[in-house]
Amino acid sequence: MFFALKRREAEDMAKSRKISFGPGFLVTAAFIGPGTITSCTLAGVHFGYALLYAILFATVTTIILQEMTGRLSLASGRDLAQALREFPKSALTRLMFTIMTLTAITFGCAAYEAGNIIGGALGLESFTSIPQRYWVGLISLLAIIILSSGRYRIIERFLVVLVFLMSISFLSTAVITKPDIISILKALVPTIPHGSLFYVLALVGTTIVPYNLFLHSAIVKKKWHLAANVKDVRKDLVLSIGLGGMISASIIVTSAVAFFNKGIGLESGIEMAQQLRPLFGDITHILFGIGLFAAGLSSAVTAPYAAAFASSGVMGWDSKQGQQKFKLIWLLVIMSGFGVSLLDLNPLAVILFAQVANGLVLPVASIFLLVVLNNREKMGSMANNWKQNIIGGLIILIVSALGFWNILKLFFG
């Protein structure tokens, strides 16, 4: 038995070394969607480089929070949703966590789903003459078919490749457009230009996605099994989330050069493709549209699946896709997104609002995670230390303050 365990440990460690991209890359692929492209583009259009600090903060915060979810899975053998259900000793506390998690994650994913569907539809509409409402129906139907088949991961990987290629194009364009490096460095110092707080919250919400906390903990649980793998989790996150932050920053930079620096406004989603014209020329709209569609559909599949997984965990349901309750959750999220997408709303406003909604939900998910990580009975040596608690507490205070301030602005002007 001893030698069998040692052999498994060696195999697990060898396997982790062979794979260059792990759960962290899937988190990056999930948040590089229509919301990221839209939020970063509008931030660059209206404020130039000034809000780059928000991306830096969001990237570092994402790495810290996702590292906590990774440690949770490695130490306890439970993902975040299961931990929220099983760890609290008080029945009242478990009930409170269950209700708040279901409300927060379902609301966040439903809001995000509308942005995903509309974003993907905008991409297809940008190089076809077919009205957006037809593409909205197609994307919603495809998401249902993919999740119903149980084989969506193969298609998702293909879509992630398309999104990744389009993201690389932003990085290339950022170099080609020759931005002002000194101004970029100055923008890493926090400032809040007039009217920018809404966009700061959107940039935070589009990067630190609450449902990714649940997805990441579940994927880490399946991929790694040893306490020593915490180093692999951290390396994977720094590499993948760091790349995601660079992609988001490049979108702001290219948008600032293409629009803000020239005093040009942005009136439609199609005009976002102009950022890529220096690299792709006349085929810009087609490539941008396909990439935006890929980002939208990939996220439109991931968001409802994450909501169903989180709901199943906190309710104690079997998370296999064959379970009717599991199917009902992701179907409700897709239909909610589909319904909002059919309303006569400004597409860019809906996508941006989805990111703001996530920014408001994030404090709830972060508090849950911080509570679980302080359960030393379950976490052992990988429980949060006082430094990690201080950092986690500061993060929660900052994102909560941003959300609260935005609510005041929405209701009281």
Image (cartoon, rainbow, N blue to C red):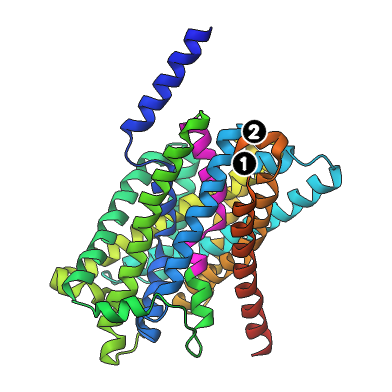
- Under mark 1, the amino acid is Phe
Report the magenta residues as a range.
Answer: 204-224
Residue at point 23% right, 78% down? 179
Residue 125 in view, yes or no: no
Taking 330 as reference, is 266 above or below it? below
Residue at point 38% right, 79% down? 187
Label disc, if present, on residue 326 of the rendered structure? 1
- Please name which of the two marks, 1 or 2, marks the residue nearer to the observer: 2
Q: Picture quarter containing residue 309?
A: top right
339 sits left or right of 116 in the view: right
* Residue named by callout 2: 318
List x then y, in percent, for residue 31: 44, 58
As for residue 208 lying within the magenta part, the answer is yes
**Front-most of 188 and 281?**
188
Tell which circle, 1 or 2, labels the residue nearer the N-terminal end.
Answer: 2
Residue contact at pointers 1 and 2, CB within 8 angstroms: yes
Q: Picture quarter containing residue 265?
A: bottom left
Q: Which quadrant would the C terminus be assigned to in this image?
A: bottom right
Gap in angstroms between the C-alphas marked 1 and 2: 8 Å
Residue 61 in view, yes or no: yes
- Under mark 2, the amino acid is Asp
